Amino acid sequence: MDSVELLRRLVQIPSPNPPGDTRAIADFVAEQMRGIGCEVRRLAPAAKPEALNTIATLGTGEPRIMLHAHIDTVPIAATEAERWSVDPYAAAVRDGALYGKGSIDDKAPLASMMLAMMDAARQDSLQGSLILVAAAEEEVGGQLGTKWLADSGHLPPCDFIVVGEQTGNKVAIAHKGVMRAAVRTTGVSVHATNPDRGVNAIVAMSKVIGALDRYHRELSERVHPVVGSPTCNIGLIEGGSTANAVPDSCAIYLDRRMIPREDPEAVQAELSAVIESVNLAPATVDIGDFVYSPWFDSALDSHYANAFLACAREVIDDDPGPFGYLPGSDAKHLMEVARGDMIIFGPGSYEVAHAADEHVTLADYQATTDILLKFLRRTVY
Ligand SMILES: [Zn+2]
């Protein structure tokens, strides 16, 4: 099977999430990796047995290098289906590009990593171990995928980790984390003919919104070298029921992006302090429903990272970075597993992912494979 055929086969196995049934694609990866002599484990959490992950290991001992890609894709949205100009699961090749749902996110990085494993299997001088992780559940946050694998001890500490995502074959070393929260104001509802007898929860919330907007602007003073500044966005508001009553409740939903090294507990305390600093009496306010997803960053000071940057520079003939990565990734769940550097790397742009006519150019896909092969040949064979 040549490299294009391998990617076509992966695209032809649908793995939309939801529902997140990755058994067929995990089995395909397992079978291919077993065929080249890897030790293969197929693992799924009891909470979602159809979210099957495959871990394939070649060689033994140290150093350990992990190649990680996710095997689930986003589903095809109803409004998206009619905008596809090709069958999203046919893996059609047209004008030097391979089209299909998941083609770039994340099956091209996965295919390049499988090709790298195949190349390694042909060497008789592999030092240490190469671990391919084909992970489920990334598109819904990775809690039952990579996070579960890491927390259950299925992933050994690794000296270098490549997380496959869309970076234009450049090297990304950080992404932001997210803190979500809900803020609720409570007032007293009365008829609108005499509003002063009531306590308007929407008016109270407007003061909270003002304070959060000032807070967002102050956050621009904190700057991370590759991902920029933290932000605080108010994305949703709900309150009141009719124009002729004073509303007694209002809620807003926040999205606070955290830059690497921001402590989630400190961020929660900071948000609470901003809200408590607003004088709303006699209305009351509370903040809660905190949900957070971690940031990731890497120092990029190991010889693996430097070798990888050098290989990328040689192949793409451009500045390989390091850069920050805008979307999140499973890298955030691998911080404890990474005892050396971790990078995000793969072909194309994430803007092509999650959309109609998702595709990867064969040239970009080839470059991804070339960089991985060059890197392994330079460091572990
Ligand atoms: Zn992805």
Image: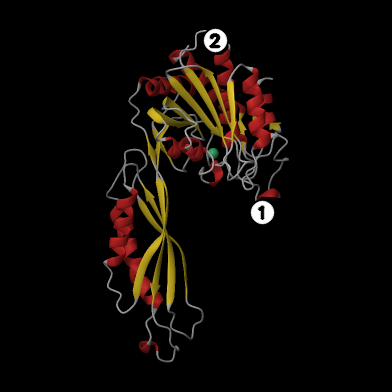
Q: Which residue lies furthest to the top in this view?
A: 124
Occupied quadrant, residue 218: bottom left
Which mark is on residue 79? 1
Name the side, left or right, on which 304 lies relative to 85: left
Residue 143 location (% of width, % of height): 50, 44
Q: Does the residue labelled 1 lie within 8 Å of ligand 1?
A: no
Residue 162 location (% of width, % of height): 47, 28
The residue at which mark 2 appears reads as 123
Q: Quadrant of ligand 1?
A: top right
Residue 193 location (% of width, % of height): 43, 91
Residue 190 drawn above or below residue 142 = below
Badge 2: how crowded within 10 Å, few (<14), some, or many (20+)?
few
Q: Nearer the viewer, residue 18 or 105?
A: 18
Occupied quadrant, residue 210: bottom left
Q: How many labels does the image show?
A: 2
Residue 281 drawn above or below residue 25 = below
Name the side, left or right, on which 333 lies relative to 225: right
Name the side, left or right, on which 207 lies relative to 372: left
Residue 103 location (% of width, % of height): 62, 35
Q: Is mark 2 within 8 Å of ligand 1?
A: no
Q: Which of marks 2 and 1 is nearer the N terminus?
A: 1
Report whether residue 141 is seen. Answer: yes
Disc 2 residue type (three-letter): Gln
The residue at 48%/36% (across/down) is 152
